[in-house]
Image (tube, rainbow, N blue to C red):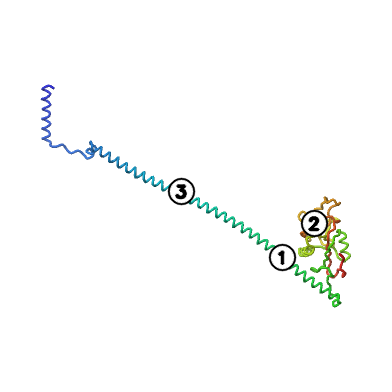
Amino acid sequence: MTKEYQDLQHLDNEENDHHRFRKGPPPPQPLLRRLCSGPRLVLLSLGLSLLLLVVVCVIGSQNSQLQAELRALKETFSNFTVSVEVEVKGLSTQGGSVGRKMKSLESQLEKQQQGLSEDHSSLLLHVKQFVSDLRSLSCQMAASRGNDSEKTCCPVNWVENAGSCYWFSRSGKPWHEAEKYCQLESAYLVVVTSWEEQRFVQHHIGPVNTWMGLSDQNGPWKWVDGTDYETGFKNWRPEQPDDWYGHGLGGGEDCAHFTEDGRWNDDVCQRPYRWVCETELGKASQEPPLP
């Protein structure tokens, strides 16, 4: 370093000292500049980092707790749903069982009511028949003693009902022979004109095939006493009469009879079925017909 350079530097230093003594101490620096300077900046960064770490830890802890509570809530809800489904299935099963029991009870009640109704009808029929038999017996006893010659009643072994007398065979004959037998007794094969008469005849013949006074041998179906068939009472079995030719006895089926359940069927007139004779009260022969 030359002597001139050293002299110039010395002069600069003196001038600077002169300015410092003349102007006073330098002005204070702002807070932000002081904080951002040197070690303070490092400490501030560490503090903020620590604070951020604490916040992250707190949020993470709360998030873990929230997830745990959410899982517990889901599990509780799932258990509740399963429990409710089980209860609902149980109630449905019980409801179905109760419904089936109710239907069974209703069916049994209907059957009992139907049975009671049938028993009641049968009892009324028996009572009515008992009264009719008693009146007929009294009439016959009075007629035999000659106490009331004008009084009419059914002959012995005939059954009175609704102003008519009926005789029920205990053997079988073809339809034509049965009709001739009734004619000999001033009667005819029974003509059924109402449900009441149907039930009366059915009660006395039981579950046995029995001829009635209905045939179509000469064209359309006709009753033997001339009662109109088309507008009158009918009680055919389903799909009857069918005039079936497959019986192997020749011809079709031209004569009607009561079946085991009381409904009507057409059949070959040559079959030996039981029969029922009918006549108006007072017109029957006083001598009972032979079986």
Identify whether 97 is placed above or below 66: below
Check whether the beta carbons of the residues at disc 2 and disc 1 lie within 8 A of each other. Answer: no
Is residue 40 left or right of 17 when viewed as pictured? right
Q: Please tell me whether mark 2 or mark 1 is closer to you in this view.
A: 1
Mark closer to the chain start, 1 or 3: 3
Mark 2 burial class by Cα count in 10 Å: few <14, some 14-19, many 20+: many
The amino acid sitting under disc 3 is Glu
Identify whether 262 is placed above or below 281: above
Mark 3 burial class by Cα count in 10 Å: few <14, some 14-19, many 20+: few
Mark 1 burial class by Cα count in 10 Å: few <14, some 14-19, many 20+: few
The mark found on residue 159 in the picture is none
Which image quarter is the C terminus in? bottom right
Tell which residue pokes out farthest to the bottom in this image.
147
The amino acid sitting under disc 1 is Asp
Image quadrant assignment for residue 138: bottom right
Check whether the beta carbons of the residues at disc 1 and disc 3 lie within 8 A of each other. Answer: no
| Residue of label 2 | 265
The amino acid sitting under disc 2 is Asn
Q: Residue at x 71, y 65 (%)?
A: 119
Judge by depth and name the residue closer to the eye, 45 or 79: 79
SS at badge 3: helix
Q: Position of residue 71 (x, y in %)?
A: 43, 47
Mark closer to the chain start, 3 or 2: 3
SS at badge 2: strand
| Residue of label 3 | 75
Is residue 222 visible to us here?
Answer: no
The mark found on residue 119 in the picture is 1
Identify whether 51 is placed above or below 281: above
C-alpha gap between disc 3 and disc 2: 74 Å
SS at badge 1: helix
Q: Please tell me whether mark 1 or mark 3 is closer to you in this view.
A: 3
Q: Residue at x 64, y 58 (%)?
A: 104
